[in-house]
Image (tube, coloured by chain):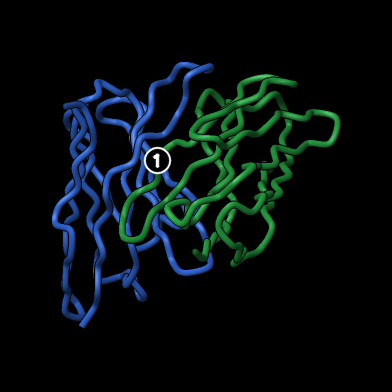
Amino acid sequence: GDSVTQMEGPVTLSEEAFLTINCTYTATGYPSLFWYVQYPGEGLQLLLKATKADDKGSNKGFEATYRKETTSFHLEKGSVQVSDSAVYFCALSEVSGGSYIPTFGRGTSLIVHP
Amino acid sequence: DGGITQSPKYLFRKEGQNVTLSCEQNLNHDAMYWYRQDPGQGLRLIYYSQIVNDFQKGDIAEGYSVSREKKESFPLTVTSAQKNPTAFYLCASSTMDRVADTQYFGPGTRLTVL
């Protein structure tokens, strides 16, 4: 079945540092790929997405490129802020028997210090 | 404003009680989902529904039940058969559009068994 593997956290950085959170996936077809962010005590919200190979999703300074050859969708940001501290989830979604069932990674906690 | 609401935000249950978590959406989405979130385990799918009066079991449906009598509502009942119900519960909805199948999440309900 489908699966998503993220690097384990927590990732601890100083403000203005470069961020990479690795994400690789296994899927039978051609999934859409997503990054969601969860702030403490809240639900998840979409950060960015890509729907086909070589697409780049971007939002709020975060970027991720859909790499079919390496089955990866790594999240990057050039300069993190304290307000970026949250848990980040990589996810995929594809049709399975006529249903759109999403698969989530375990999440990576990011802590940014001033 | 369009979105998903969950209530209550905090819920306490005694051993042997059934409790029902509410989820309502006004996004006109066909699909709705319930997830359970435990620390370090990411999201696990409990049930999902892609049309009124129909729903499917997810990965951890035992001890839970749902109904989908209206498009905008998808309540989850945690029964006494669920042996370890203390967790954070998230409801989500999405369209069935292959390209735009982003999940929209509610703020969550934290259930604690006393």
Relative horizontal placement of residue B92, taking residue A76 as reference (left or right): left
Q: Give the x, y percent position of residue A57.
A: 60, 26
- Name the residue nearer the viewer: B111 or B78: B111
Q: Chain of mark 1?
A: A
- Name the residue nearer the viewer: A14 or A54: A14
Looking at the rendered structure, the number of numbered marks drawn on it comes to 1
Tell me what residue is drawn at x 45 percent, y 50 percent.
Answer: B45
- Name the residue nearer the viewer: B103 or A29: B103
Tell me what residue is drawn at x 67 percent, y 50 percent.
Answer: A18
Which chain is drawn using green?
A: A
Tell me what residue is drawn at x 42 percent, y 60 percent.
Answer: B37
Tell me what residue is drawn at x 69 percent, y 46 percent.
Answer: A23
- Name the residue nearer the viewer: B9 or B82: B9
Q: Give the x, y percent position of residue A38.
A: 42, 51
Q: Give the x, y percent position of residue B7.
A: 15, 52
In the displayed structure, A11 sits above or below B114; it is: above
In the displayed structure, B19 sits above or below A27; it is: below
Which chain is drawn using blue?
A: B
Q: As drawn, which residue projects farthest toward the right?
A: A69
Q: Quadrant of residue B79?
A: bottom left
Q: Amino acid at mark 1?
A: Gln
Disc 1 crowd rating (10 Å Cα; few below 14, some 14-19, many 20+) is some
Relative horizontal placement of residue B16, taking residue A111 as reference (left or right): left
Residue at which label 1 appears: A45
Relative horizontal placement of residue A56, taking residue A98 as reference (left or right): right
Q: Give the x, y percent position of residue B4.
A: 23, 37
In the displayed structure, A47 sits above or below B107; it is: above
Of the 4 image quadrants, the one containing the N terminus of chain A is top right
SS category of the residue bearing label 1: strand
